[in-house]
Image (spheres, rainbow, N blue to C red):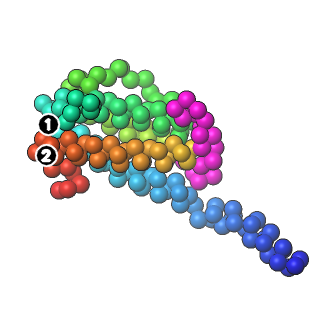
Amino acid sequence: MRLFRTIVIATLLATPATLLAQGNPVSDAVRESAGDNGKNLLAAAAAMPAEKYGYKPTPAQMTFGQLIVHIQGDNRITCAAIGGKPPAAEPALSATDAKDKLVAALQRSLDFCAAALAEATDAQLGDMVPYYGHNAPRASAMIGLVTDWANHYGQQAMYLRLNGVLPPTAR
């Protein structure tokens, strides 16, 4: 029985060291997914013709421009939580701003997120961070970010198809 207990304790003590030796597999996976999803968001924003930024499929849905403003705003909140640093001050955006202004703001928000994710480590995943009005593990913000980006790209792809534009991932 002592030998079994010793083996279990030794295994538990060795596990964190083993994980540290492997680097940051969870943070690396999130970074990779975020990179792919971020490229898709930006490519979709670029693919939508400027005159269609006011398009919305139904009265209850956002316009494409509102969707871009929403994504960049969420990025600023979520990536501030992930990185522990506030985003740079930005002028207020409107969904009716010119396409190039909206795409540039989206790009800056994606860059801000890339910088926040670049600093993230697996050792920090359980750290509590302010996230949409409450404290949550940093892992929740990181996973929420890539999930949100995938969902929003799905919205963008639908808007593009409804306007006769092939989404970037379908090319």
Query: From this viewpoint, is residue 121 visible?
Result: yes
Query: From this viewpoint, is residue 104 visible?
Result: no
Pointers 1 and 2 in contact (C-beta within 8 Å)? yes
- In percent of width and height, residue 81 lies at 53, 36
For mark 2, give the secondary structure. loop
Q: Which residue is mark 2?
A: 165
At x 17%, y 32%, the residue is: 55
User: Tag 1: residue type?
Assistant: Pro
Position of the N terminus, as image quadrant, is bottom right
| Magenta-colored stretch includes residue 135 | yes
Mark closest to the chain's N terminus, 1 or 2: 1
- In percent of width and height, residue 58 lies at 21, 33
Position of the C terminus, as image quadrant, is bottom left
Q: CA distance from mark 1 to mark 2?
A: 9 Å
Q: Which residue is mark 1?
A: 49
Does 115 sit left or right of 159 as displayed? right
Which range of residues does the magenta coloring cover? 118-137
Does 105 sit left or right of 87 as displayed? left
